[in-house]
Amino acid sequence: MSALLLDRLRSAGGWLARDRAAAALARQSKSLEQAVAELRARGYVIDEDPDMGLRLQAEPDVLCPADLRRGLQTRIVGREILVRDRVTSTNDVAWQLGEEGAEEGTVVFAEEQTAGRGRLGRCWWSPHGKGIWMSVLLRPVVGEELVPMTTIIGALAAAEAIRAATRLPARIRWPNDVLIEEKKVAGVLVEARQTGGGRGLVLGIGVDVNADDADMPPDVAPVAVSLSQAAGERIHRLHLAQELLRRLDRWYQVELERDADTINERWRSLSATLGRRIVLDEQGRRYEGTVADVDVRFGLALRLSRGNVRTFRGEHVTVIEHG
Ligand code: BTN
């Protein structure tokens, strides 16, 4: 398996002498030349120097379960990791796995979704290889009532993972859109259902990683941004995907401990909405005002133009404009 050579090249972090590289394959029937050729065929760029040996120059931006699992160290999220090439929606696949009795924490990534779903019945555009489109199957003891909180921990995990992997200043537009500056870069969709293995939740997250304007549908381009557009360089998805799984795992534990204060504090600190003038839509009616407060338990308190404060819950509301 060329995975052994790959591990050695990665941990060398620079040049690896040929004899040490060959030692990694000592118990294999494969020669060093064959292993290098295999890795190159899979998109790894490997330099060769007669004196220095071999050096891993670049890795292909392909998600694979073995790489995603390596060093992950999560408790629940990622107990099982699957990667599919093309699916309707990773939420559909997670539900299917749930029906078949998959364990809590099973995660499915796809390179492409043909019918990705967004909040409020919208479509979620998910082109091949350009994003992180993933869902995790959760089986908390209670179900439906955890949907709003699970949506919030999804947004927290996505914003934190983006910050950690790219240093971009991701923030959360109430309740759960992840923005860079004023443009949406990631979204969260949580669904609750009865499955063969009991009641469950599927937490789906989409992060727009390497799309260009030319890839985006005309209605998406003005309001969306990809991480590569914001950073000015291509972003490798593996590190970001692992950060996402780790942070989801951490925030899910906090949610299971019913520690709403800790979640609230972090969510408020990443809020792009608190204190802003906004326009929001609640089932077709528009409201304009200044956001007096956001709280994971009580909702968004909007000070309307006449001075009175009205509170909104996140499930049926969209923030249309940040002032
Ligand atoms: C939104 O902001 O409207 C929510 C978008 C959620 C998109 C993700 S992509 C992975 C998962 N599968 C889906 O069909 N939707 C979610």
Image: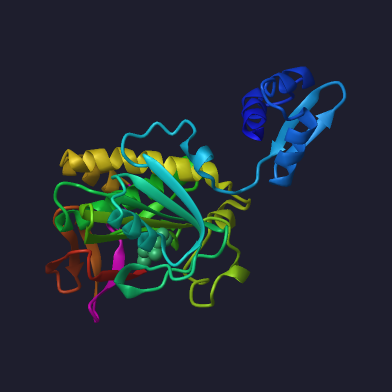
Q: What quarter of the picture does the N terminus occupy?
A: top right
Residue 111 horizontal/vertical position (percent): 53, 57
Count of labels shown? 0
| Residue 271 horizontal side relative to residue 149, left or right | right
Residue at 54 percent of width and 45 percent of height: 64
Q: 194 or 184: which is nearer to us? A: 194
| Residue 305 horizontal side relative to residue 136, left or right | left
Residue at 66 percent of width and 41 percent of height: 59
**Which quadrant does ligand 1 occupy?**
bottom left
Q: 314 or 118: which is nearer to us? A: 118
Q: Is residue 285 magenta?
A: yes
Q: Residue furthest right?
A: 50
Q: Is residue 50 magenta?
A: no
Residue at 58 percent of width and 46 percent of height: 236
Q: Residue furthest front?
A: 29
207 lies above or below 312: above
22 lies above or below 63: above
Which range of residues does the magenta coloring cover?
270-286
129 lies above or below 26: below
Residue 226 horizontal/vertical position (percent): 53, 59
**Quarter where residue 46 is shown:** top right
Q: 201 or 158: which is nearer to us? A: 201
Asked whether the viewer can see residue 272, the reply is no
